[in-house]
Amino acid sequence: MEEGSGDEKGQAIQELLKSCPKTVPQRFVQPDGYGPRDRRCTTLGLEIPVIDMLHDRSTMLRELKEACQDWGFFQVVNHGVDMEVVRNLRRLAYEFYVMPSQEKRKWRRKTGESAGYGAFGKSSDGTSDWVDTLCMYLSPESARNVETVWPDKPELLRVYVDEAGKQIGEYAQKLAADLSESLGLPRDHFKEVLADSVASLRLNLYPLCPFADRVLGVGAHSDMDTFTILIEESEKEGLEVLKNGLWLPVKPVRDGLIVNIGDVTQASSNGKYKSQGHRALVFEHSERVSIVVNYSPLPGVSICPAQELLSSSHPAMYRQSSYADYIDLCQADKSLGRDRVDSLLC
């Protein structure tokens, strides 16, 4: 997914709605066959796995392995993150988004940068996404820029971004070790990838949309990172996962975390774990705030299958690349779409 400063006019979706409350510019309309209603299935009864961290370790690791192989998505409960902190952060996010436009513009994302406030950008097919974001880097320390990027209003927003980021980060370190162990790798394999990693926290607002049946909050894509942790509002089903060619809605478990595997993990696992396509819907009569934390390697980190997973009968599926080169490749060729990790196939 390409992040940018918003639509071609650099206008946040909220501002666009104020000027045109009953219309949607053509740049947001999905092409035929790619809209919210296309290939959508709500009748199969399939749901992404839910993993309870209080299960005995062997059961938990088996469930984790199966979820990563079959879905690339799972939900986690009893994860140790204080959800009261998360609820306070979401409340403050709503307060930020209802502030006057001139106040929010103080934190507007600069051209070519990801951190800051503004519309998200465009999907790989060039269609604009119906979502406003506030993105803040949690690490490395040199990228945080708290005073210039993290809004100082509403009061305590910075405090709760920092606290939520720390707690979710603690779970991310456990997850990295568990992913390694579930693959039969040393527990520090992915922890080394995440050491001094780039972590960002986004507060995504999906505003009301007068033509929600033709527009997507975020178009179909996979994540380029190691993995992503998402916290949705429990009563709102806005996330959909691609499974067997169909889009299946995800019903968020109360106080759960939604995790999806990224391209880096797919390559590192030699294709055993899947970086699955997904998208976000919008609705005509309700808005929502999603909290998204992405974990990515530093630019110079090498992406390649773990040597322990390779043999004469299981050769490397992916060639070695630095993470920076992989990002450049994806940004240069938008046609790669959600299968862009295949660009690294040997």
Image (cartoon, helix red, strand yellow):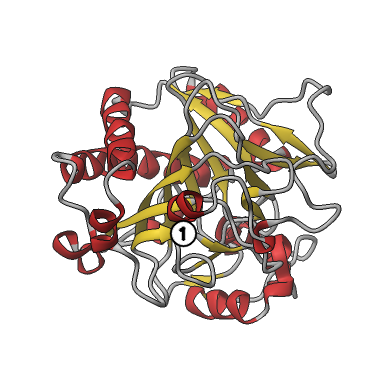
- Pick whichever, 11 or 109, lies toward us: 11
Quarter of the figure with residue 104? bottom left
Taking the image as shown, residue 303 lies to the left or right of residue 70, namely: left
Residue 49 appears in the figure: yes
Image point (61%, 61%), residue name: 128
- Pick whichever, 322 or 247, lies toward us: 247
- Pick whichever, 42 or 104, lies toward us: 104
Local packing at callout 1 (Cα closer than 10 Å; few below 14, some 14-19, many 20+) is many
Reading the image, the residue beneath label 1 is 119
Image coordinates of residue 71 in percent, x first then y, are 69, 39
Image point (56%, 61%), residue name: 264
Image coordinates of residue 219 in percent, x first then y, are 66, 54
**Residue flagged by tag 1: what amino acid is it?**
Ala
Question: Considering the numbered disc 1 on the image, is that residue within a helix, a strand or a loop?
Answer: strand
Taking the image as shown, residue 136 lies to the left or right of residue 328, namely: left
Relative height, residue 105 to residue 23 (above, below): below
Relative height, residue 192 to residue 58 (above, below): below
